[in-house]
Image: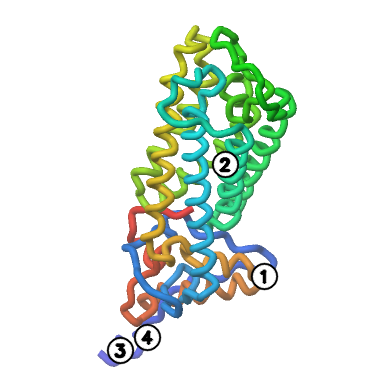
Amino acid sequence: MSSSSSSTQPWRPLLPRSPPPSRRPPLPPLSALGRTEPTRGGVGTSFEGVYGRWTLTEADVLEVRAYRASLCVSALAFALCVAGSGGLSGGFDAPSASPLPTLPAPAVDALAAASALGLGAALALVHVYVAPLKRALQLLWLLGCAGAVAVAAGHGVLYEAGAASPSPSDLVAVSASSSIAAAVAGDPGSIWLVGPAAAAATGLAFKEGICFGKLEAALLFLAIPSLCLFHLLAPAVGVYGPAIVPLERLGSVMVSAFALVFAFSKLGQPEAEDIGDKSVFDFRKLGPEEQAAALERARMRAAFGGGGDGSRGGPAGGGGGGSEEEF
């Protein structure tokens, strides 16, 4: 009896050893960054993250509002561009074919530029855990903007007043007074130049759809590449000229409608959701030794039952109990 009691050792949690300071610790899997139930809280609210607690600051809220405002500007400008250019089918459109009044070419291009700038600002402000993915989206946006300039130069967009209307029988019917949007509509090959910007918008829609389960983001993710591919490949199957106008107009209107619903639905989301797990971003700013210490503290919290205060996890981390993932 005495020998068995003396041999009993006190229980201690088995903690994995920390990685050497010279090696950068790996990030947790995406499943550990899953968003839990939406958490509403203003400035000063604390959340439990993967690498510790973090607090929502006034700067965080302003950044999220700027991101959402950029989305709204981009979506609204694109919708006005579609409406003012006859559904982006100006390359073959007769003036009486569109029920909406058409805008002058400089106004259409100004709206297209505003939409592109809004998208670029959103891509700069969005919180994405995978940094190379964010940089890739920004690079695609930059390539698409450069491609739009190339389209303008290649088609001679000069805004000359009184230029003759394009003939519907021409394969590429773009006059000197046409906008860049009409130049793209009249030349399917121009998708190779401006398409990267559309791919960047598609990637942002994919991120939002995966993170927050937004139906309109998923529809936008499907509609943008479908419209671009249809415009690019339709001539190969013999569908081009005036017959393509109603189809492309419908596709353009659908994309603009999905973009508007998606952008303005973001205004009602809690700001903390668009921040994600701020502890992950703070973790990446640390040096290797500080990252190792942060990982050790995270393991200690996990070994002793988490934060110990019974609070639920933040909008993008904390217990990995959510089924959704944040990028």
Q: Amino acid at mark 1?
A: Gly
Q: Position of residue 294 (x, y in %)?
A: 55, 74
**Looking at the rendered structure, which numbered label has been put on residue 5?**
3
Give the residue furthest to the front.
Answer: 162
Return the residue at label 4. 10
Given residues 189 and 84, the one toward you in this image is 84
251 left or right of 88 in image: left
Q: Position of residue 258 (x, y in %)?
A: 39, 40
**Residue 305, image quadrant:** bottom left
Q: CA distance from mark 4 to mark 1?
A: 36 Å
Q: Amino acid at mark 4?
A: Pro
Q: Position of residue 302 (x, y in %)?
A: 41, 72
Q: Which numbered disc, 4 or 3, marks the residue that appears first in the sequence?
A: 3
Asked if disc 4 and disc 2 are in contact, CB closer than 8 Å, the reply is no
For disc 2, the neighbor class at 10 Å (few under 14, some 14 to 19, many from 20) is: many
Return the residue at label 2. 111
- Mark 1 falls on what kind of element? loop
Quadrant where the N terminus sits is bottom left
**What colour-coding does the image apply?**
rainbow
Return the residue at label 1. 287
Front tag of 4 and 2: 2
Total numbered badges shown on the rendered structure: 4
Asked if disc 1 and disc 3 are in contact, CB closer than 8 Å, the reply is no
- Mark 3 falls on what kind of element? helix
Residue at x 47%, y 74% (from the top left corner): 56
Q: CA distance from mark 1 to mark 2?
A: 44 Å
Front tag of 1 and 2: 2
Q: Which numbered disc, 1 or 3, marks the residue that appears first in the sequence?
A: 3
Q: Amino acid at mark 2?
A: Leu
